Image: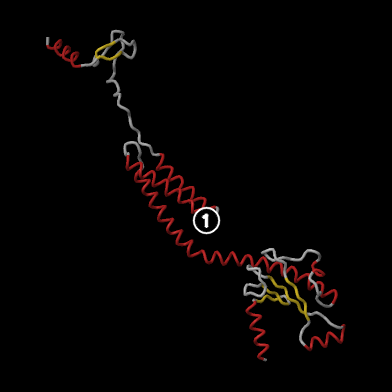
């Protein structure tokens, strides 16, 4: 009798459900359906299962690794792409804080954000301190390219002097049709001249007027002849415009 009452109590308290095998409406909680299907457990709850999304946090980590690798392998200037890492990590942190049930990886996103900001500040400080030296190196390469063009012209001038006994009045005679240019695509200025009084007398006694000195000059970055950034070669030796001005002052004092 007690067993029947317990069954009736269970039937009254249980809700109806469909048998997953035959589809017959049965009382929820019974162990077996009339079709013979046996229930091994309670049916799953119909409430949605929330799985935390780690995509935003992992994306920020992946971007950090990508930017770091590119800066180390290619050039350190690619580190400016860290701004994308900061944005991605900030977005992942915001999503995880706003909806922690749907978005995970809050600690990872925060760590990525902090590490990227600290590294960016360090790189920015280094870049600012390195900028003057980088500009100087950039200008040095331009000067070196111009000096290389002058050395090429100097070799042609020396070859001409060995053949004819003096430097030519025009650079074209020594180097051919195409005149050498500096880095800034400006033609080199050439001037040949005789030496001091003793050299003039000796030259006149031998063959008349002999041009035994020369000057090659580049206008430099500003493109103006006579300024301090001129690149000057005299008889195979490089001078600055200030050096030549000092030499002229000393000669006048003598």
**Is 115 positioned to the left or the right of 166 in the image?**
left
**Is 155 positioned to the left or the right of 142 in the image?**
right
Q: Position of residue 219 (x, y in %)?
A: 67, 70
Q: Residues within 10 Å of mark 1 (few under 14, many from 20)?
A: few
Q: Position of residue 71 (x, y in %)?
A: 51, 53
Residue extending farthest to the top is: 34
Viewer-proximal residue among 68 and 252? 252
Q: Which residue is mark 1?
A: 77
Residue extending farthest to the bottom is: 254
Q: Quadrant of residue 118?
A: bottom left
Task: Quarter of the image for the C terminus: give it.
Answer: bottom right
Task: Quarter of the image for the N terminus: give it.
Answer: top left
Residue at 53% over, 66% down: 133
Viewer-proximal residue among 181 and 17? 181
**Is 104 positioned to the left or the right of 197 in the image?**
left
Q: Where is 124 relative to 168, above or below? A: above
- Visual colour scheme: secondary structure
Q: Quadrant of residue 138?
A: bottom right
**Is 147 positioned to the left or the right of 35 in the image?**
right
Residue extending farthest to the left is: 1
Residue at 39% over, 50% down: 113
Q: Position of residue 161 (x, y in %)?
A: 81, 75
Q: Position of residue 236 (x, y in %)?
A: 72, 75
């Amino acid at each position: 009798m007690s067993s029947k009452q317990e069954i009736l109590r269970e039937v009254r308290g249980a809700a109806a459900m469909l048998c997953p095998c035959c589809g017959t409406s049965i009382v929820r909680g019974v162990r077996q359906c009339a079709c013979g299907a046996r229930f091994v457990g309670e049916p799953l709850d119909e409430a949605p299962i929330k799985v935390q999304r780690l995509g935003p946090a992992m994306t920020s980590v992946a971007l950090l690794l990508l930017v770091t690798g590119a800066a180390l392998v290619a050039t350190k200037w690619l580190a400016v792409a860290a701004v994308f890492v900061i944005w991605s990590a900030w977005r992942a942190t915001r999503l995880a804080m706003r909806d922690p049930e749907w978005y995970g990886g809050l600690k990872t996103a925060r760590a990525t954000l902090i590490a990227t900001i600290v590294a960016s500040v360090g790189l920015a400080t280094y870049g600012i301190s390195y900028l003057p030296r980088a500009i100087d190196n950039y200008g040095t390469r331009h000067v070196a390219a111009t000096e290389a063009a002058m050395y090429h012209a100097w070799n042609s001038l020396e070859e001409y002097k060995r053949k004819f006994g003096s430097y030519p009045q025009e650079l074209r005679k020594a180097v051919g049709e195409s005149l050498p240019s500096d880095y800034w695509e400006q033609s080199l200025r050439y001037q040949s001249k005789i030496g001091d009084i003793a050299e003039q007398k000796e030259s006149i006694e031998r063959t008349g007027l002999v041009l035994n000195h020369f000057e090659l000059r580049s206008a430099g970055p500003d493109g103006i002849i006579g300024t301090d950034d001129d690149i000057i070669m005299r008889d195979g030796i490089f001078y600055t415009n200030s050096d030549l001005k000092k030499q002229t002052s000393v000669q006048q004092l003598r």
